[in-house]
Image (tube, rainbow, N blue to C red):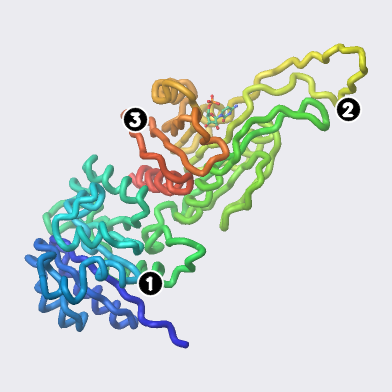
Amino acid sequence: MADRPKRILLIVGGGIAAYKSCELVRLIRKGGGEVTCVLTEGGAKFVTPMTLAALSEKPVHTTLWDLKNEAEMGHIQLSREADLVVVCPATADLLAKMAAGVADDLATTLLLATDKPVLAVPAMNVRMWQHAATRRNVARLRGDGVTVMEPDEGPMACGEFGPGRLPEPEVVHAAIMRFVSADPLEGQPDFADDRHRGLHGRHVLVTAGPTHEPIDPVRYIANRSSGKQGFAIAAAAAEAGARVTLVAGPVHLDTPPGVDRVDVESAREMLAAVEAALPADVAIMVAAVADWRAADAAGQKIKKDGSGTVPPLALAENPDILATLARSKQRPALLVGFAAETENVIDHATAKRARKGADWIVANDVSGDVMGGDANSVHIVTASGSESWPAMAKHKVARALVDRIAKDIAK
Ligand code: C5P
């Protein structure tokens, strides 16, 4: 049986780029999809309902207070009968409302009421895109599961230059197709188009997991790190187009697709593997490296002789891989460390950033069940201060971090 046409609910916000939504409607129709358009009040200043109705061959919805439609087809239904909700262009105002959960017109009400995936395609002035408020809103939306595409860079209608332009309709259409044809088990695609894969051509080095420090051939010193966060970061970097080397301590995790994995046991082996993987553009040191190892690991199993005498366990300090990399001639352009803390998280992370020579420290409070768990709540400490992200799944932290890294190294 042939698949039914994919249904797109297209919300057109109020920006000059709204004219490109007409072409997008045409492309969706040409590709065999159905599209229902919702125009915000601002959107209607740039394109008329008549244009979108003619191109989509469907009524265009503009107001929450259309009683006829409310009787025939409530706004809740409108928001749920689509396979995908696309906001294009997504203005700074619309992104802010979405992030805050405001529902004061038809478009925002639909966005709050929907149970379908949402793809937002931002378009705005470069300063507005780079403003801390928009950064915060985009990070929050991404954390909430909304896919926010990266805008294009180039000359803008307002005369300025930089990121903020709406991607071409073909690129948005390709993103929509990726979405609606995605395998539901695989989840939503991360990046709308190859041109938006922000780490393309970069080498990203990630360490993950604990280390095991042998005491004798059968015993070792370990910690509770599961490796989940580091593996999620390696996966997200690969999805963002990077070549990824993942140096992994002993963990029970599958290698993410497209990632080169090097398995190690001890801190010294991890350091050697990290050095062998250089040069790298970015290094993200997520591993919970043991601070100490047994000073003299025994070659044979240490025997309990029944005398009650306990063998001494002398410790030696392990090399600090992050600090070694920071001092290395081949220091990656962006060096990110992690810090697991149980108190004064940001203060300790700030001190750690300086002490180890990292560019950023991602600090997490491990006083709860972060180690081994699936969620994480992190603070990003950089030269310009700290930023706290809401608690989210480790794979979402990974995507948001990779996104921030891609933007940073593109500067
Ligand atoms: O000092 P602390 O272990 O809290 O520092 C954490 C950060 O340093 C993490 O990024 C971790 O991967 C890195 N680290 C390292 N080598 C060590 C200890 C920690 O690379 N020996």
Q: Quadrant of the C terminus?
A: top left
Residue 214 against residue 171 in the figure, above or below:
above
Q: Secondary structure at mark 2?
A: loop
Residue drawn at the location 29% of the way across and 48% of the way down: 138
Residue drawn at the location 39% of the way across and 82% of the way down: 4
Q: Earlier in the sequence, mark 2 or mark 3?
A: 2
Q: Position of residue 146 (x, y in %)?
A: 34, 55
Q: Is residue 121 visible?
A: no
Give the spatial CA distance, label 1 vs label 3: 37 Å
Front residue of this view, candidates 108 and 206: 108
Which label number is shown at residue 386?
3
Front residue of this view, candidates 380 and 322: 380
Residue 160 against residue 312 in the figure, above or below:
below
Residue 34 against residue 79 in the figure, above or below:
below
* Callout 2–callout 1 Cβ contact below 8 Å: no
- Residue 21, quarter of the rendered image: bottom left
Circle 1 sits on which residue? 177
Give the spatial CA distance, label 2 vs label 3: 48 Å
Circle 2 sits on which residue? 300
Q: Earlier in the sequence, mark 2 or mark 1?
A: 1
Q: Position of residue 130 (x, y in %)?
A: 24, 45
Amino acid, disc 2: Gln
